[in-house]
Image: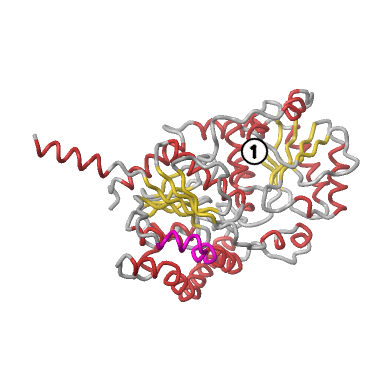
Amino acid sequence: MNKLLTYLYLILHLCSAYKVLVVFPYPGKSHGILGDAYVRLLLEAGYEVTYITHAGYKTPHPKLQQVDVSSNKFGLEKSLDFKKLIAKEINLLDMWTMHEVMHEIAQDAVMHENVQKFLMETTNEYDVVIGEWLYTELYSGFATVFKCPFIWSSSMEPHPMVMDLIDEIPNPAYNPDHLSPAVPPFSFMERATELLRIIDYKMIRWFSAAKEEETFKAAFGPALAKRGIPLPTFQEVKYNGSLMLGNSHISTGLPTRLPQNYISIVGYHINSKITPLPDNLQKIMDTAQHGVIYFSMGTMMKSKTLPDELKRDFLNMFSKLKQTVIWKFEENLPNLPKNVHIVQWAPQQSILEHPNCVLFVTHGGLLSTTESIYYGVPIIGIPLFADQFLNIQRYVTKGFAKKVDIGYDTPAKLKEAIDEILADPKYKKKAKELSIIYHHRTVTPGAELIHWVEHSTCGALG
């Protein structure tokens, strides 16, 4: 009997892991939303959470500790400019540039004085660390310091750079890279291009290895030494993840062979408790006789940087529509048509959830497109950078979206796409079908997330 009680105590002790470190220091709003969702779900499950973040909570939960890195200034907004993008002065699809920029951001985060102070406090203990992968594996070092399991969080659909950390690189003949504009089935040239992307990725790994090793030692070496833990190589640490929580699902992505330690949790950021619309927006949505078109280019690329000519052309085009247009824009615009409403901040999910929302014009970020599938709203994508091109191309293939390239002729092409989608019921029908597939899951993505975090903390994955 005593042995049985002892075993029960040990099991309960092992599975009562309530201290989680969440590492999401990237200064982008959309990535902050993903990090915040982890924190919200973990706190609701009763965990104690420490959150390394660039934009913390002003009124934190009593079980939440925050490590603030907001004093790091990355100057991203200077690069993310519509005029420069249209003029092709910047290339946001270059993997080498992306890797270099993200390494610098991660390096500044792990070397931040608040993070270093946090690491050097030997009383800090954690049962599991969850770190976002964003072109760097530096955050895996936290789990080495705290001698606990590490969980990768992948903010995109599965692609070679993340799958290489937990399994093997997917066959490029059938699987696109996240920066690819193509979806399978590939032509011969597209297969060759995907193979070259893999080679490019491996070269980046090789050339950056020494710099990453140096940053790893500088950031985590002192804390490890203070705890008397031998300093491992970064090569060993970054491949020591227990599992990966991926922002993907068959409804939003492509059918891909995945290992058992990759868990799909797309949509975990969506809170089932929808925030009510402000009175002014509620009235606009309710009284839109011909429906509402919601237009938002996300949070990273500011719409106010659009050339004045494009702003005028968009407004002129919108004025010719019978639908009401809600445009998320960071400043007020003069001479607005009667059917156009500018909002500097928009409760996006609340708008998409409203039955009068007939179309979503978006940049193609995975959060926005996931929400469109969640609520069954067709989209027109105007992709700008990173995985947005692949996202939109997938949805065009799935049959509920149209793609329009950014340029000075965008308003005219957007008008054609709007007319086609609203005139043909197949787009709305397909969006509703995918919404059913999304929701037809054994548990919610939030419950899936919590289950696998608990699975890791119980030591089942070693």
Left or right, 452 with reference to 13: right
Left or right, 361 with reference to 56: right
Task: State the residue position of label 1.
Answer: 400
Please tell me whether residue 111 belongs to the stretch shown in magenta. yes
Q: Callout 1 environment at 10 Å: few (<14), some (14 to 19), or many (20+)? A: many
x 57%, y 31%: residue: 433
Quadrant of the image occupied by residue 346: top right
Q: Residue 23's x, y, as percent?
A: 48, 54
Is most of the magenta stretch helix, strand or loop? helix
Number of marks: 1
Report the magenta residues as a range. 107-120
x 78%, y 23%: residue: 287
Q: Residue lying furthest right in this view?
A: 335
Q: Residue 1's x, y, as percent?
A: 8, 34
Q: Note whether 210 is above or below 46 in the view shown.
A: below
Please tell me whether residue 218 belongs to the stretch shown in magenta. no
Of 419 and 321, which appears nearest the observer? 321
Of 124 and 400, which appears nearest the observer? 124
Left or right, 29 with reference to 442: right
Question: At label 1, which amino acid type do we have?
Answer: Phe
Q: Residue 113's x, y, as percent?
A: 51, 64
